[in-house]
Image (spheres, coloured by chain):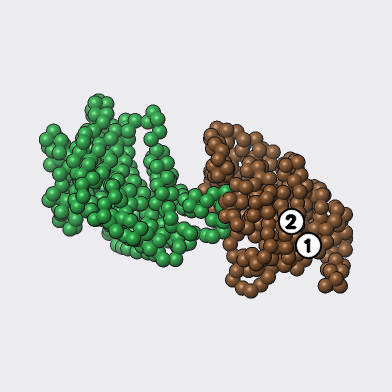
Chain colours: A green, B brown
Amino acid sequence: MAPGRKVAVDAVFDSVSLGTTFKDELAKAGVIFCSISEAVREHPELVRKYLGTVVPVTDNYFATLNSAVFSDGSFVYIPPGVKCPMELSTYFRINAENTGQFERTLIICDRGAYVSYLEGCTAPKRDTHQLHAAVVEIVVLEDAEVKYSTVQNWYPGDEDGKGGIYNFVTKRADCREARAKVMWTQVETGSAITWKYPSCVLRGDDSSGEFYSIAITNNWQQADTGTKMIHLGKNTRSRIVSKGISAGHAQNTYRGLVSMHPKAKDSRNYTQCDSLLIGDRCGAHTVPYIEVRNASSRVEHEATTSKVDHDQLFYCRSRGMDEEEAVALVVNGFCREVLQALPMEFAMEAQALVAISLEGSVG
Amino acid sequence: MLEINDLHVKLEEEDKAILKGLTLSVKAGTVHAIMGPNGSGKSTLAYVLSGRGGYQVTGGSAMLEGQELLDMEPEERAAAGLFLAFQYPVEIPGVGNMTFLRTAVNAQRKARGEEELSSGDFLKAVRAKARELKIDAEMLKRPVYVGFSGGEKKRNEILQMTMLEPRMCILDETDSGLDVDAMKLVSEGVNALRDAGRAFLVITHYQRLLDHIQPDVVHIMAEGRIIKSGGPDLALEVEQNGYADLLAEEGQKA
């Protein structure tokens, strides 16, 4: 973390929040950042009004499971017109064996407010699988903006695919009013299996959603990830940039939905999906669903699949980098657009993580 | 500095010999030029020395200051002081030119057990050297070779060479695609590096580069080996008469 930059942190271990830093300073700005159990006690009116309104209890199997058993998580409320004075961050860790983590995150960004929220995850090595079934709900009101960044580094299992986290997460943002903005950025390097589609419901007119993703799978990992952009309001915009990197025996799928509803007149989407393969035993798949129900909207989709180029690697090595360093450099270049969307200190961490996740993928 | 002895190389994929008993000795402080017709194996020699895949060494050796190059990984050869200025350097999208250079410099320093350069020191050094090669700040920021013109690529290769301070520099047709001004810049960059502890192997088709980078020894290569060596006059002779006479002479010997 860069020195001098303040980041308020809420740590959640095994679904229990350990407490939040910089609370007083945030309170001065009117920002509420606490565990969700505390929010239930201290701010019941907000929790009652918003919880479950973005991801209903019946949304999907894992969302239902989470809704039934969640014990804790993070809660954020930014009052009207307030630009949150620092970045907010939740750090999740699963320690216990044979367990699941079911945290719940609720973020409400009131009219004209702004917040940047970072989420980091780790888990120690275990031979058995653990389940992570989180739900994240974000409500964005008129003229408000939320940036949500994730670096997901759950234990991916060993070289033979033994152990690792099942990461089945439901994340959704509701741009409920006009000109609301949300930006999801994710760097997914961990977990044995990931199913995750951070989505944007673009309900308010002129609202916009962005999704930037890097998913790296190595050894026997599987990642099935992407986004849903649901255009309901007029003149709504969405942009999707997905970079999938696959090595070893891993399978990497981009699965996304862009839906233009009849009333979403003059809306636009741009999607770019790039896949990079390292070695000849891995797979990359792109499954874009596109539904357009009005004639004035425009949807663009571009996709590429390529292999790590031997000439590039040789060139790097002839300048003194070893093979792993060369792969990390080339892959980081491939991901550049998404890394640039991350907050500065997260971007450095993410770059290092790219290198670590691909260790042993060549040669 | 560089001692190549009876080097035999064939393509890995097919049974085709490219280098057939090449012997060459380059002493520290000297510049050797290699000229020869297309297909004589000049670029293969450069690639084999730097460790590119796709070739199989079937005999001979190549020693750099007493170390066998052919047993080393490409990055080990680089750390040992070998540098190849590529004829066609590759694009690496998304990787800033400066980031690349700094990663390379520090990788070599690390391999040699030296301390990594701080970003401040690195920036200072690279800016000063870039200026001499008329490489502006914008070009240092661009992704490696993406959208570079032929001349920009070659100047940038020389910038890398200047920053990496190798002891044995191989230039593979560095003059190809250069206009007169660019050739002058590139040659000045090379000449500035000439010193008693460094040697150059300049591979070229044309004598004109050798007007700017004056060689101590000129070798003519054909059919995978050196067929004639001499002073700078040999390059002029080739320029005037072509390779035909030399090849015929070689043919009679064989």
Could you tell me residue B200's position as x and y percent?
A: 73, 49
Residue A48 placement: quadrant: top left
Res. B216 in view:
yes
User: Relative to residue A342, is residue B24 depicted above or below?
Assistant: below
- Quadrant of image for the C terminus of chain B: bottom right
Q: Are marks 2 and 1 in contact (CB under 8 Å)?
A: no
Could you tell me residue A296's position as x and y percent?
A: 35, 58
| Circle 2 residues within 10 Å: few <14, some 14–19, many ≥20 | many
Q: Residue at x 61, y 38 (%)?
A: B126
Question: Which one is in front, B70 or B37?
Answer: B70
Under mark 1, the amino acid is Ile
Q: Residue at x 68, y 50 (%)?
A: B66
Question: Which one is in front, A65 or B81?
Answer: B81
Q: Which residue is mark 2?
A: B203
Under mark 2, the amino acid is Ile
User: Relative to residue B12, is residue A193 depicted above or below?
Assistant: above
Q: Residue at x 60, y 57 (%)?
A: B71
Q: Residue furthest front?
A: B66
Q: Which residue is mark 1?
A: B226
Residue A39 placement: quadrant: top left
Callout 1: SS: strand
- Dot 1 falls on which chain? B
- Dot 2 falls on which chain? B
Earlier residue among tags 2 and 1:
2
Could you tell me residue B222's position as x and y percent?
A: 77, 66
Could you tell me residue A134's position as x and y percent?
A: 22, 49
Q: Residue at x 76, y 44 (%)?
A: B29
Left or right: B52, with B253 as reference point: left
